Amino acid sequence: MQKKDDLRTLLRKSGYKATPSRIAILEVFKKNKNPISAQEIINELPSDTDQATVYRTLKSLKGKGVIKPIDLRHNHAHYELANIVEHHHIICLGCGKIEDVHHCWVKEVQDTVLHDSKHFAEIRQHTLEFYGLCKSCAKKHPDGGRSCSTS
Amino acid sequence: MQKKDDLRTLLRKSGYKATPSRIAILEVFKKNKNPISAQEIINELPSDTDQATVYRTLKSLKGKGVIKPIDLRHNHAHYELANIVEHHHIICLGCGKIEDVHHCWVKEVQDTVLHDSKHFAEIRQHTLEFYGLCKSCAKKHPDGGRSCSTS
DNA sequence: ATCTAAATGCGAATTACTTGCAACTAATTT
DNA sequence: AAATTAGTTGCAAGTAATTCGCATTTAGAT
């Protein structure tokens, strides 16, 4: 129950009502360490939650910065919780495998970027992702087209 | 004609036939300095090119690394030429304004990232984008929801 | 000039996501 | 604790972006 109450608090602090669907969606995020898609969330939910609710919830959580989109180079959006330790990913262009990159260098350059900018007042977010081939795909198809399965 | 021949060469070197549609698509990329969407390309083309051709061409140019996707946080894909000077972007969460970030720090850390990785053999690409508020949007809506127009 | 794999155009299909609206419910007010 | 109300949901239909199947065409090799 402790956890559920934390989520309730997180939701209220972000200006939302703490409804069962939203708590369930956040629980799915807590459970999955990799970025997940709307469909993956829908599949893991107790099946009485409508997809429109999931999409609406994702959109508004994104708007408030509770979750952030991660571009896995698939054809649909993936998200992960924003309030976890700043990190990035390496994503395999062959099979979609994801590995975390634990260090974040971006903070160190963000101020420079902002000051060098002519038109910007503020930087709120950033993405840094690496794309390559995992060891197993590097053997299979050394030229790296995407041919393994991806979700 | 020089330019067109360069594009022909680029296409053939990448393993494609140099068809008029593909040359036209690459010319649109050369003309636009910001990342562009499939629809923007379709609008700028002489109107006899089918959208399926544009989408297919984008997909295969992306596969070969001739163009790369840039996530502008809109609801559809944007691309830019990959073989230009390495750079990144700051994107306004309010109005979608894009400014180039001319220095790239990523090369300096890429080797470290690869060596720290357990499962990866190779890094081929990366994305680094900053999201924030431009000076004009920072005045209009200091809490930064997206409400200006975006394309 | 001929040949063939690759590319195109067309329409239909699919995927990912959104919207309108009536019913419902969390949290505030009394 | 009941009443209130603004935010939220489910459903079904809708839209935007992208893809597919297939007959036809074309670039570039022979």
Image (spheres, coloured by chain):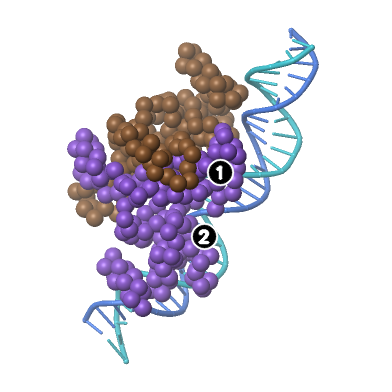
Chain colours: A brown, B purple, C cyan, D blue
Q: Is residue A113 above or below residue D19?
A: above
Secondary structure type for disc 1: helix
Amino acid type at mark 2: Gln
Q: Secondary structure under badge 2?
A: helix
- For residue B136, which numbered disc appears in the image? 1
Query: Mark 1 falls within which chain?
Result: B
Q: Amino acid at mark 1?
A: Ser
In the displayed structure image, the side of residue B141 where residue A103 appears, left or right? left
Return the chain for callout 2.
B
Q: Quadrant of residue A113?
A: top left
Q: Is residue A88 visible?
A: no
Q: Residue A130 at what x, y percent from top left?
A: 31, 43
Label 2 sits on residue: B39
Q: Which mark is residue A19?
A: none
The x, y position of residue B132, in whole percent, is 48, 39
Give x and y (percent) for residue A51: 56, 37
Which tag is nearer the camera, tag 1 or tag 2? Answer: 1
Q: Nearer the viewer, residue B144 or B57?
A: B144
